[in-house]
Image (tube, helix red, strand yellow):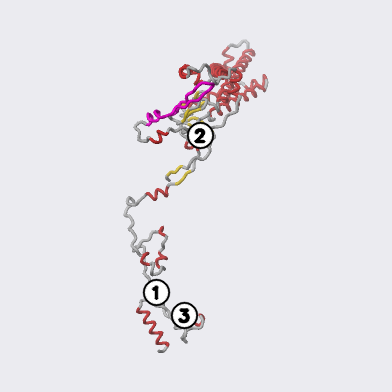
Amino acid sequence: MDVHKRHSLFNRTQEQASFTVFQPGFFNSELEPESLEDFDFEKAPNHNPTVNTITEEDDPIPHSSGVTYHSVVTSCGSAAPMINQQQPPLPESVEEYDMQPIYQKVLKERPVKNYQIFPGNTRFLCGGRLVTSKDYRAFIIALILFITPAALFCVFTCPFLWNQVHPVIPVVFAYLFILAFASMLKTSWTDPGIIPRNLDIPQQEMIDENASSIHASIMSDIAQKQIRIKNTSWSLRYCETCKIYRPPRASHCRQCDNCVEYEDHHCIWLNNCVGKRNYRPFFTFIVTCVILCIYVIAFDVYYLLSIASSSPNRGFGFVFSQAPVSFVLSIYCFFLLWMVGGLTIYHCSLIMRGVTTHEQLRRDIFKLTYPDLGANPYNKRNPLKNMVQVLCQPQPKSYLRRRKMADPVIEKL
């Protein structure tokens, strides 16, 4: 058979098979080009392969499946049945779609610090560096009552003292004011000794979740803890709010909603509890306020007497007209001295006896609770030693790691 006839017969056979393959000839044919440069591309037969075109409307493919339209078109014949399978129809409404996977994608972890999730009525300022209570209205009033008379004294009395007496008098006043103001802020913004929560969670609370009264179930199964101080047995009281056994001399503050170690009292004017870590600046503040009151009264009276001596024929009206602010300041500081001075004397007696305000107010209950305890075990039997114990010890570290990172909290976007 001629070579050209064999070539045409082969082409007709391939056309009947629904596809066209270019075949210039057999290896021994004379028409076979020796190289690619000798091949005539213009005379070559057209090759139009037949493929199954799949549109998105006929067979939608999820973009997240990893299969693209290009891969469907260029896939081999053996993989075509698997790709051309009918996909499940999309839901007609949003309500029919399962939103659970979407919620799982929306959730994310947000790192927080311990002070941001701390319970109670405590307010943290400056990124957890400062600790105070949430009710700050009385503290603002205390600031006004403290700063205003000091500013008036500097404006109306200190110029006379600087020029007529000695410049050191206003300087000493400024030093005392700064000391009192710094002690006031330190007492108000310092952790008083807050005890961390959930240190002694009762197992009954974790097991009996369906109890009708969790309070009754907890109190019925809480074990009593006993300690001994100077041969006397002490029972530790359990705090249901903080979930801890309160150590001796610790109390739960209702205003702050925290258990505070060595709590003396809650001062509404300073907007914080007075406890183990801020009792010393509190005592410094009230003592300095007493000194400032005496200082202002003494030099205001001296100023008024100087005006009266310069005009002996004039009466009280003339003196008051020359220095009305100094006269009002002396009266204001006189009444303030009685209040703050009485508080200072009271705390001096507490320090020398080695007791706190809570212990002093509850001494009758304390004697009924511990009848075998003859005296206060924390009393050093020496007023000087008690003062050193309270006022001269270094400030202990805070139990709260306020600026440390807490466990991650998962929230929705």
Q: Position of residue 324 (x, y in %)?
A: 56, 18
Q: Position of residue 10 (x, y in %)?
A: 39, 82
Q: Position of residue 124 (x, y in %)?
A: 50, 34
Separation of marks 3 and 1 at Cα, in angstroms: 18 Å
**Label 3: few (<14), some or many (≥20) within 10 Å?**
few
Residue kind at label 3, given as amino acid type: Phe
**37 or 212, which lies in front?**
212
- In the image, what residue occupies the spot 41% across and 84% down? 7
**270 or 192, which lies in front?**
192
Helix or strand or loop: what does disc 3 sit on?
loop
Q: Which mark is residue 49?
A: 1
Separation of marks 2 and 3 at Cα, in angstroms: 83 Å
- In the image, what residue occupies the spot 53% across and 29% down? 193
Query: What residue is shown with label 2?
Result: 124
Query: What residue is shown with label 3?
Result: 41
Residue 139 visible, this orientation: no
Q: Earlier in the sequence, mark 2 or mark 3?
A: 3
As drawn, the residue found furthest toward the top would be 313
Q: Is residue 313 above or below residue 277?
A: above
Q: Is residue 77 left or right of residue 174?
A: left
**318 or 95, which lies in front?**
95
Quadrant of the rendered image containing residue 52? bottom left
Residue kind at label 1, given as amino acid type: Pro
Separation of marks 2 and 1 at Cα, in angstroms: 75 Å
